[in-house]
Amino acid sequence: MNDSALIIVVLTIAFSATLIGAVIARRVAVPLRPIAAYQALPEIAADAVESARRVHVSLGSSAVGEPGTVSALVSSEIAYQLAERMAISPYPPLVTLSQGTTLPLAQDTLRRAYEARQRAAYFRPTQVTWYPQGPRSLAFAAGASSLAADSDVFTSILLGRFGAELAYFGESAVRHDQILIAHSDQPGGQAIAYAQSDRPLLGEELYAGPAYLTRRPLHVGTVVALDVLRWLVILAILFTALQAAL
Amino acid sequence: MLNFLATATAMIAGVTMVIGLLSDPGSDARAVAALVIQLVAVTGAIAVLLGILNLLSVHLGRFTHAERGWPYSLLVLVVAVGVIVLRILDRAAIWSGDLEGEQLSPRVFEAVQVSVESALAALVVFFLVYAAFRLMRRGVTGWNVLFTVTIVVALVGWIPLEDLDVFAELREWLVRVPVGAGARGILLGVGLGTVTAGVRVLLGQDRSLRD
């Protein structure tokens, strides 16, 4: 099977499983495996509103138009869910990022969240802070974590693309008694997220976030598709390993 | 109407890219996909330009209204203007004498940015060791013990002493086999997640496409 045929097969399975999963989710409640980070997010938003404190969401170096595009889109969807819940508070979420192309996406995400709660007048584009340092920048991490500490945030949520710089966010979160939820689509950043975060998100769990937070049938369908593809990959690995051994 | 246009554009661009990827090199479909990528690059460049203008206007506002931290805003403005001027002078090839033919803006970037990044990078290892310690304080589970032992073996493996050769070999095996396998597993998961989230975008159901 060549690459083109493989892409067609994977896309066909992904589309079919998503649509079938969405139809099933529309009829019956599909149980989702508990993920601590997604269970905590609504509580974090509620606590932030009640205690009049801010939440820091960082999209790292996820960049629209680059390989991290989908990470940026999914992370912004999670940021939307958080911002929508927090839009009634006078203490808005703080969003930081290091890629200029993601800045309009993040600002638009917050604007839509405030509009959805009919609080558009309270939206400020400066809630999103861009550190023009480029990918995997330690200077970005040092600056953004320092800003989060100055802004008296009580939770830092790191989603998307991070490398070793994630250690700075983690260290700052510990020093300032912040809850830390962290993820990275890079193995280096993921390892640090596991070590430092109270509730890490691992690998593909980021992409399931919208399904956990919205329960929309199509989003649940993508989780079903993810599971189907995962099992197919596991079976393919086992099959090829057995074939090589025999 | 705007939502419809945004959704339609995203879906058409996505389908065009998929068809382009599946087509033979040199085909019309591949050429159209390349055009879409070029448009994305131009749009990205405009987004960065808007970001820079936004950054400058925010800091100019802070400086003129003497808001908290205004000296930092002034510093940002001065450095931004300085770098832009330096870049223009580089492009004009204005330097003479010892500096003839030199590009000063990359040199300034290296002198400041690379030094800062190197200094910060040196601290990462301490953060990680402390993180491993805290991980054990949170709870002594099998996974946490494995993580900590692996860190200790990796760090000891770097010590260049003859008696510790066994640790160096163990570290190399760790990096080659379990770490390599784990990293591939994570990347596979991320890849599959990207495909399923991409399906949502292709179906026009991503929130960034609608109000």
Image: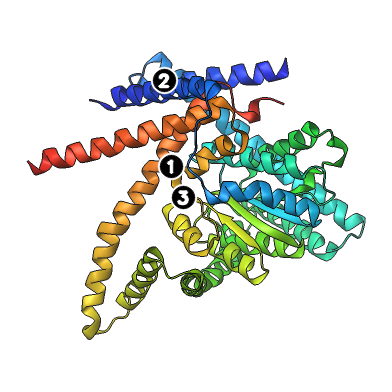
Where does the image place residue A220, in percent across and percent down from the top left? 52, 30
Type of amino acid under label 2: Ser
Left or right of A161 on screen, residue B59:
right
Task: Point out which mark residue A202 bears.
Answer: 3
Please identify the residue farthest to the front as the structure is shown. Answer: A28
Residue drawn at x 51%, y 55% as measured from the top left? A200
The chain to which mark 1 is attached is: B
> A193 and A198: which one is in front?
A198
Q: Are marks 1 and 3 in contact (CB under 8 Å)?
A: no
Residue drawn at x 36%, y 65% as measured from the top left? B142
Where does the image place residue B146, in percent across and percent down from the top left? 35, 67
The chain to which mark 3 is attached is: A
Where does the image place residue A155, in percent across and percent down from the top left? 67, 58
Q: Which residue is mark 2?
A: A16
Q: Secondary structure at mark 1?
A: helix
How far, Cα to Cα, is label 2 from label 3? 25 Å
| Circles 2 and 3 on the same chain | yes
The chain to which mark 2 is attached is: A
Instruction: Work out whether mark 2 precedes mark 3 in sequence or the reverse, and give the earlier one.
Output: 2
Where does the image place residue B62, in percent across and percent down from the top left? 86, 55
Q: Which is in the foreground here, disc 1 or disc 3?
A: 3
Dot 3 surroundings within 10 Å: few (below 14), some, or many (20 or more)? Answer: many
Task: Point out which mark residue B190 bears.
Answer: 1
